[in-house]
Amino acid sequence: MATSEKPILNRVRANNYNMETQDTNSMRKFTGYYSLSSDNGQLPQGAFLQIISMATQNNDFQINSISFSLDGKNVTVLNKSDFSIGRPGTNTIRIARIGRITLKKNNGGSISSLEGSINNVRVLGVNFFNPVPLEVFQGYYKDAFYKETPPAKDRLRIFKSIGKTKPLFEIKFDFGGEKLVRIEDYEYDPSMYLLSFKSPETKLKYSLMMGTNLNLGLASFVLVHDDPLKNQLLATIPQKKE
C-alpha cells in the first residue's frame, strides 16, 4: 500500500449542515476498512475509506469517526459532527460538502461493500474486516504458559455486568498486586480487537490485543506502554511450557 512518511491529516467541519437522525446502532455492522477503486481506474493503490467504531464502559460499540484517502497518501478524518447517517434501512452516510456513500452486506468473500461519490469521484469499496463485539472475549484469563503447576490466579476477567448502574462489562486486571483491580474506564476497538485502559496507580497505558490461539482458547497479548518488560501473554486455557 502506498503511504506517506508524513501523511497529511485533513479535518472537515460540517458548519451549518442539516444533520439527519443518527442511527449508528444499525450501521455499526459496516465498521471496517474498505479498499477503494473506481470505474475508470482513477484511484491509485492505497486509496481507502475506514469506518471506525469504539466501545466504552457505558456504551456498546458505535460509529464515532470515518477516515478516507483518495490518493493513498493524504488522509481526511471525519468526526461525528462531520457526517450523518441516513434514515433506517437506507444504509447511507452523507459527508458534509464531500459526498455520499451507500453500504451493503455481502454474501461472498468480503464482509461488506460500498459505492458512492467522494469529492466528485465515484468510488467502489470492499471490506474484509468483521467487527467483533467485546462480549465474544468474555472469560477468565491466566498466564498462558506454566512450568510445573497450572496457574490458579486469574490475571484478567471479562464478563457482562449485572445491574443497571454498572458498566456494560466488568473488567478486572492484575497489575502485579495481590488482587484484581476493577477497570472503571476503558475503550474497545471492535475492528482491531483492542482493549485499552490505564493503571489507576502508575497511569501507564495498557493495550490488550484480544484474539484466539491454537491450543490456548481465547488469548490476550498485553502491551504495556513505556514498560515493555511487563508485556505478557494471557489465555483462558494455559498450557505447560515444554
Image (cartoon, rainbow, N blue to C red):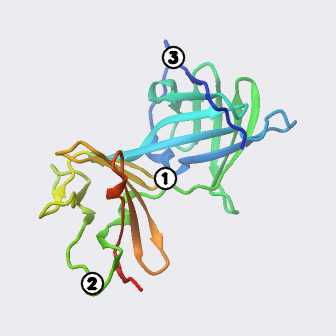
- For the residue labelled by badge 3, is the local secondary structure a helix, a strand or a loop? loop
Q: Which residue is mark 3?
A: 17
**In the image: residue 171, left or right of residue 107:** left
| Circle nearer the viewer, 1 or 2 | 2
Image position of 44 with respect to 20: above or below: below
Q: Amino acid at mark 2?
A: Pro
Name the residue at the right extreme: 40
Mark found first going from the N terminus, 3 or 2? 3
Give whichever of 226, 194 is nearer the camera: 226
Residue at image x 34%, y 75%?
A: 236
- For the residue labelled by badge 2, is the local secondary structure a helix, a strand or a loop? loop
Q: Position of residue 203 (x, y in %)?
A: 23, 42
Give whichever of 167, 103 is nearer the camera: 167
- For the residue labelled by badge 1, is the local secondary structure a helix, a strand or a loop? loop
Q: Are marks 1 and 3 in contact (CB under 8 Å)?
A: no
Mark found first going from the N terminus, 1 or 2? 2
How far apart marks 1 and 3 lie (CA) works out to 31 Å
How far apart marks 3 and 2 lie (CA) works out to 59 Å
Q: Which residue is mark 1?
A: 192
The C terminus is located in which quarter?
bottom left
Q: Amino acid at mark 3?
A: Tyr
| Circle nearer the viewer, 3 or 2 | 2
Q: Position of residue 220 (x, y in %)?
A: 39, 64
Residue 59 appears anywhere in the view: no
Residue at image x 39%, y 83%?
A: 241
Residue at image x 23%, y 71%?
A: 154
Q: Which residue is mark 2?
A: 150
Say which quarter of the image contains residue 108.
bottom right
